[in-house]
Amino acid sequence: MTNRRSFIRQTAALLGSLALHQHAQAAFLTRSLLPKAGVSDPDSEEEFWRQIRLAFACSPTITNLNNGGVCPSPRATLDALDYYNRMCNEAPSYYMWRILDLDREPLRYNLAALAGADPEEIAINRNATEALNSVIFGLNLKPGDEVVVSKYDYPNMLNAWKQREKRDGVRLVWADYDLPSEDAETLVQAYLSKCSPKTRVVHLTHVINWCGQILPVRRIADAAHARGIEVLVDGAHSFALLDFKVSDLGADYFGTSLHKWLCAPFGSGMLWIQKDKIPSVWALLSNDSPDGDNIRKFESLGTRSFPSEMAIGYSLDLHQLIGSARKQKRLHYLKNYWMEQVRDIPGIRFYTSMKPEWGCAICTFGLEGVVSGDLSETLFRDWKIHTVPIKWEKIDGVRVTPNVYTTEQELDKLVKAIHRLATQR
């Protein structure tokens, strides 16, 4: 293996010099330069993650621990965005409609491979909101039909269901529970207890954005299906974070944002619908066959950002280089790394489990006697640590979310800051 200095120089050059998309795999997948997966040497493992950090244009002045909102794209993706934008502007109608519009098909295939799905079940959208709204507004529901939702679901999704309630007479039934939870049966019953003969859909958030709680989606979905109820899953914070295939969830519909954990360009998302259910979901936007069986009816956007779509593939390459299992393990490790060092502080409260089956990258914490907004503001003002305050239902704290480029040293600074703030209360 090359020495450290040469290693860094070669890797940085490779990750920063992409021009055409056909070269992306050669640049990203130079595995001979990278420590092998599953190595037992901790130094080699940390070296691997230091090289991954080089793939991103990390701020030298701000410690970004708010990746729960949106994740930055790697340098190669940024280069691709610039390249495709310049290409399109040379002859827009030619490159956009005759070239890049066709290139959506190999991208669909590659996303389907990661999702463990048939490409004919995958639509490329702009975010989870668009993907899930396609289902929420496309389902054939009638007045009196019931939909089970949770107070911890994402506001955009709740607002969509509330619009159907107001416009179409659909009735929303609310599941509630305390977080964090490590009791699968309690969470399952929180939803099943709200189901009735009128229930048509259960809406589930795979990873709750407020605190990172992972729901036992498969158990809830199986129980709902046994009652003839369909299941819609909001996977905005689970896809490309947790190591799973969409089919593992046992759901009927699934939507996600690719600009979160896949680190794709801002404004990119994905919709999955079980193939035999596509005809029963109406297209959200106009289409010549809105009740047809072609998944592409959910991509009828008119003029779109072709550069953003094409650049998704570069982020996908980096994700595949890391590997889903390795990525999940690393992010769970980073979450627990800082939690373990502050867990004994008097008055600290966690809204997130430390167990891998119940929580991964995201953790929300609070300090007794400290307003969450003030805590987040102080972390940034005094330590240049970017987080976000969360005050939603029974959660009141600060959400901390590292990413694959986050270092232990950055989290050490967070730990030091929390200890200092705790003594100053």
Image (cartoon, rainbow, N blue to C red):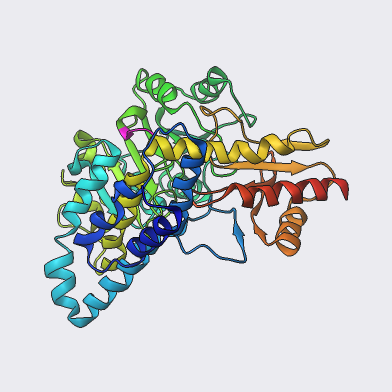
Residue 243 shown in magenta = yes
Residue nearest the viewer, comparing 88 with 341: 341
Residue 16 shown in magenta = no
> Is residue 205 visible from the viewing direction of this image?
no
Count of numbered tags: 0
Residue nearest the viewer, comparing 400 with 181: 400
Residue interval drawn in magenta? 242-246
* Vertical comparison of 166 with 76: above or below: above
User: In terms of secondary structure, what is the magenta stretch mainly?
Assistant: loop
- Left or right, 236 with respect to 414, comes to left
* Residue 130 on image: x %, y %: 37, 54
Residue 245 falls in image quadrant: top left
* Residue 206 on image: x %, y %: 46, 36
* Vertical comparison of 349 with 98: above or below: above
Residue 266 falls in image quadrant: bottom left
Residue nearest the viewer, comparing 340 with 39: 39
* Residue 101 on image: x %, y %: 17, 63
Residue 113 falls in image quadrant: top left
What residue is rendered at 32% in x and 34% in y?
Answer: 246
* Vertical comparison of 90 with 359: above or below: below
What residue is rendered at 20% in x and 36% in y?
Answer: 275
